[in-house]
Image (cartoon, rainbow, N blue to C red):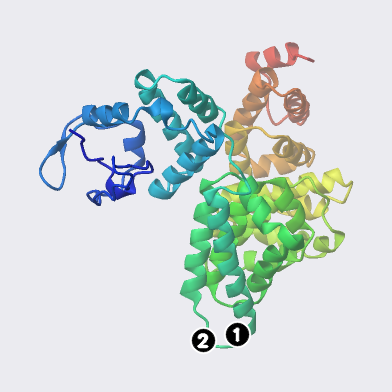
Amino acid sequence: MRTACPFGNKCFYKHQLPDGSIDPGESPHVRRRPRLNEFIFPDEEDDEDEEGGEFSMEDVMNIIREMQFPLMYDVDFDAEKLVAECVDSIRVVTDAPIENCHCALWAVMQILGPHLRSENFSSLEKSAENYQVNVETCHDRVALEQSASTLFDIFLEKQELSYSADQDDETICAALDGFCDIVNKTDPRIPMAVISKNNWEWMSQMLIVLQTDQNDSVREHLLSTLQVLMEKCGEPVKRTLVDTQLPISLVPLTQKSNGIQVGALRVLAILYSTEAEIPLEQLDYLNIDYFQRLYHHMTDYQKTDVLEMCTNFCGLLQRQNLDLSAVFEPIRENPYECANLGIVLIQEMNRKCTVRRLQFLHHVIELGETVLSKLFYENDLKVLAHVLARESINHSDKEIRQLCLTSLRLLLATKTVNSDDDIEYALANFDEN
């Protein structure tokens, strides 16, 4: 007796009856939206369907066996295309990050493997293992293009209504949240391709809105979007933004006290982590007065953002052989007011040594014993010396080991810290290789 297909009229097989007609099938029962963990860890306990019948994992495997899988794709079989479609389907259904969707598919293939051995299935397994996102055609590319297009229209409308009360600020904030959600969950090449089209026209329109809109909620969402794009897409986005008016427009935002200064400074700090050169006109705004205010009002920001802003900006100035006084003169003039910066510097150095942090520290130590004794507590300087000693021995990067050793020797020369056995060991056992 012929049994009815459990997938009904949703099955992708052609169910042909003996008389040549096609069995229309019945609509399958509607089930709840599956979750990502169910693709990876199937529940082996029996669940009851809507009619009260039992539907177990064993039933699923029986259905798959009855499908005669080896014959499914004999015609026009394209394993890579099928795998891509499966990953996209999991992405649509679960809204999980695309790398998790790939892992889910691979886990399912491992579960099915012992039951479905064939040449075609082996091809599927290999394609799943070597899966690469198709940046041009995948689901995320289509979804992000649609989201970006919607936002682009909103940006233009915002500019037309810049002096009107008819603007719907909740709409742009929700659209930006949706855009960032896709960016965070997809391959970085996809947002890069979307925002860089037509000579970065989309990004240019967004920056215009940031510079002209007076709603702080909208500006905070725009700043968050810039942060997400820089963190996800990296150097190409930073290089593009640093050569615009964005840094100059961010300076007054970082000096506000209504909360927006936090996001503005974070974006500026990430922006200056670029390897590109700073346009010289920006130095007129990021001057001694600016950094003096920044040091004295560290409690208005995330303190690590202040440190990153200073170390990144200093690194770019040094790279271009430009004057560093804007960053260090406020510390020399009033080290007591910069004590919070000193504390954060040691904490972050203990957590992670980077080239730019070490370069910044080197210039701080060069300010001399008088400044150091006011900027740091004595015990903190001892901790710093041991951090430098430890990293000069243990760090995997030769440049960082060399910078640690140089700063350690300079610090000992100021007489603010006395050497001990651990420090002497580091000085004697530095690895030049």
- Residue topped by disc 2: 166
Numbered circle sitting on residue 106: none
Is disc 1 in contact with disc 2, using a CB cutoff of under 8 Å?
A: yes
Question: Of residues 105 and 374, which is closer to you in this image?
Answer: 105
In this rendering, the answer to whether 57 lies above or below 113 is below
Image point (57%, 88%), residue name: 164
Whether residue 185 is visible: yes
Image point (36%, 32%), residue name: 40
C-alpha gap between disc 1 and disc 2 = 7 Å
Name the spot of residue 362 as percent of width and height, x first: 76, 36
Residue found at the far front of this picture: 19
Secondary-structure class at tag 2: loop
Name the spot of residue 406 as percent of width and height, x first: 78, 27
Q: Quadrant of residue 381?
A: top right
Image point (86%, 59%), residue name: 280
Using residue 15 as the reference point, say whether residue 290 is left or right of it: right
Secondary-structure class at tag 1: loop
Name the spot of residue 2 as percent of width and height, x first: 21, 35
In this rendering, the answer to whether 283 lies above or below 1 is below
Q: Quadrant of the C terminus?
A: top right
Q: Quadrant of the N terminus?
A: top left
- Residue topped by disc 1: 161
Q: Amino acid at mark 1?
A: Leu
Question: Of residues 380 and 283, which is closer to you in this image?
Answer: 283
Q: Residues within 10 Å of mark 1 (few under 14, many from 20)?
A: few
Q: Amino acid at mark 2?
A: Asp
Instruction: Give the mark, 1 or 2, whose residue is nearer the N terminus.
Output: 1
Question: Of residues 103 and 233, which is closer to you in this image?
Answer: 103
